[in-house]
Amino acid sequence: MTAGVNTIIYPVKDLDGTKALFRALLGTEPYADEPYYVGFKDAGQDVGLDPNGHAKGMTGPVPYWHVDDIRTTLAALLDAGAETLQDVHDVGGGRLIASVKDADGNLVGLLQDPTG
């Protein structure tokens, strides 16, 4: 089951420049501001800037579908023909992410928040 796309991550080369752009667009300061990730929240959306995204194979913004069971969902996508881009891993606090690409090269992210 999915809760929809609530997170989008942008691969960026100029973290400071892109951070300034999103500050201007959203009219707010980031909730997370680290050299490896900058995150904004606006209108129920989480917008992330990843300066290492290109090195991870990100070719553009990646929508992250919030799911109940990331491993089951990932297996279903792989069975349907997707290719693993990034296997399931913890990005902190028990939050799990993974990503795949479809036959056309479109990226799909999965995100599972910790339970309990």
Image (cartoon, helix red, strand yellow):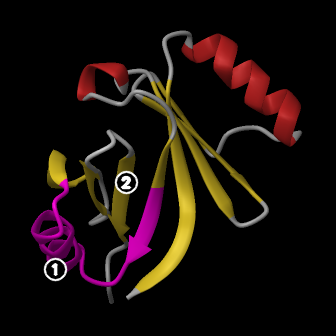
Whether residue 27 is in magenta: the answer is no
Is 42 situated left or right of 63 in this image? right
Q: Is residue 81 above or below residue 8?
A: below
- The quadrant of the picture occupied by the C terminus is bottom left
Label ID, residue 72: 1
**Quarter of the view holding residue 75:** bottom left
Which residue range is magenta in the image?
64-82
Q: Nearer the viewer, residue 43 or 61?
A: 61
> How far is the residue under mark 2 from the one under mark 1?
15 Å
Residue pointed to by mark 2: 108
Question: In the rendered structure, which disc, 2 or 1, sits on the residue that comes first in sequence?
Answer: 1
- Disc 2 crowd, CA 10 A, few/some/many (<14, 14-19, 20+): some
Residue 3 in the image, given as x and y percentages of width and height: 51, 81
**Quarter of the view holding residue 73:** bottom left
Residue type at the position of mark 1: Thr
Mark 1: secondary structure = helix
Residue sitting at x 27%, y 66%: 94
Residue 111 in the image, given as x and y percentages of width and height: 36, 64
Residue 70 in the image, given as x and y percentages of width and height: 23, 73
Q: Is residue 25 above or below residue 101?
A: above
Query: Would you say the residues marked 2 and 1 are in contact, meaning their CB atoms lie under 8 Å apart?
Result: no
Q: Nearer the viewer, residue 77 or 68?
A: 77
Residue type at the position of mark 2: Val
Q: How many marks?
A: 2
Residue 45 in the image, given as x and y percentages of width and height: 67, 60
Residue sitting at x 54%, y 49%: 8
Residue sitting at x 49%, y 11%: 13
